[in-house]
Image (cartoon, grey):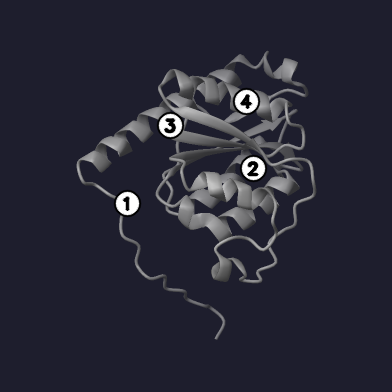
Amino acid sequence: MKVILVNGSPKEKGCTYRALSEVSAELNKNGIDTEIFHIGAEPLSGCMGCGGCSKTGECVFGDAVNRFAELAAQADGFVFGSPVHYAAASGALTSFLDRAFYSAGGKMRGKVGASVVSCRRGGASAAFDQMNKYFTINSMPVVSSQYWNQVHGNTPEEVEQDLEGLQTMRTLAKNMAWLLKCIELGKRSGITVPEQEAKVKTNFIR
């Protein structure tokens, strides 16, 4: 079993990475393979709603989103991490998530998901809530912890001092490993992801 941890910070080895590393290490201790995927510092376009992905199976922009989608097909779970910018996920990660879920949501449906946020002081719960909505619109079980999945600090060294935050990361990893193993046992018993009905869309403006 494998979990992809997505670092949505422009800083490859900053506070968000420190939080994800704590999750990754604990997952490894529990027998789960991991890979940390950095979205990079290059500008990421938002979704244009062009519908091109429905024809080609991938986003029309050949960037980190398509590279992630290739990994997502083989993964069993996901942790998306972001710094808090104006009480929200980073602009780059928001664009990344919009496009990844629109073009490759089928590769993640039925797989477990979790989000992690890193902030200097405030806005963590708002960003955390924003990111979790991607899972709940895509039929993904959301993994919980002992508190909201957040760490505090302005530098990775300061995050080291947030003992509660790091413990929250480890508890998240333990819960994710447990859920992944339960799902795997279910598959071996013939229990599969629920069959999806054809979507019904109700427009409120006639």
Residue at 59%, 66% in the rendered image: 53
Q: Find disc 1 in the rendering and name its residue.
A: 193
Is 77 on the left-hand or right-hand side of 81?
left
Q: Earlier in the sequence, mark 2 or mark 4?
A: 4
Disc 2 to disc 4, C-alpha distance? 18 Å
Which residue carries the number 3 mark? 176
Above or below 74: residue 150: above
Question: Which residue occupies 70% across, 52% down?
Answer: 63
Chain-order first, disc 1 or disc 4 = 4
Q: Secondary structure at mark 1?
A: loop
Identify the amino acid type marked 3: Met
Circle 4 residue? 19
**Which of marks 3 and 2 precedes in the sequence?**
2
Is disc 4 surrounded by few (<14), some (14 to 19) or many (20+) residues within 10 Å? many
The answer to whether residue 45 shows anywhere in this view is: yes
Q: Position of residue 194 (x, y in %)?
A: 30, 55
Measured along the vertical axis of the image, is residue 103 above or below residue 168? below
Please tell me the numbered disc located at residue 126: 2
Provide the secondary structure element on which disc 4 rests.
helix
Label 2: state its secondary structure. helix
Of pointers 4 and 3, the one earlier in the residue sequence: 4
Task: Measure the C-alpha gap from mark 2 to mark 3.
Answer: 22 Å
Which amino acid, mark 4?
Ala
Give the Cα distance between marks 4 and 3. 15 Å
Mark 2 and mark 1 lie on one chain; the one further toward the N terminus is: 2
Q: Position of residue 35 (x, y in %)?
A: 56, 32
Callout 1 touching callout 3 (CB < 8 Å)? no
The single residue placed furthest to the bottom in the displayed view is 206
Residue drawn at x 60%, y 24% is 21
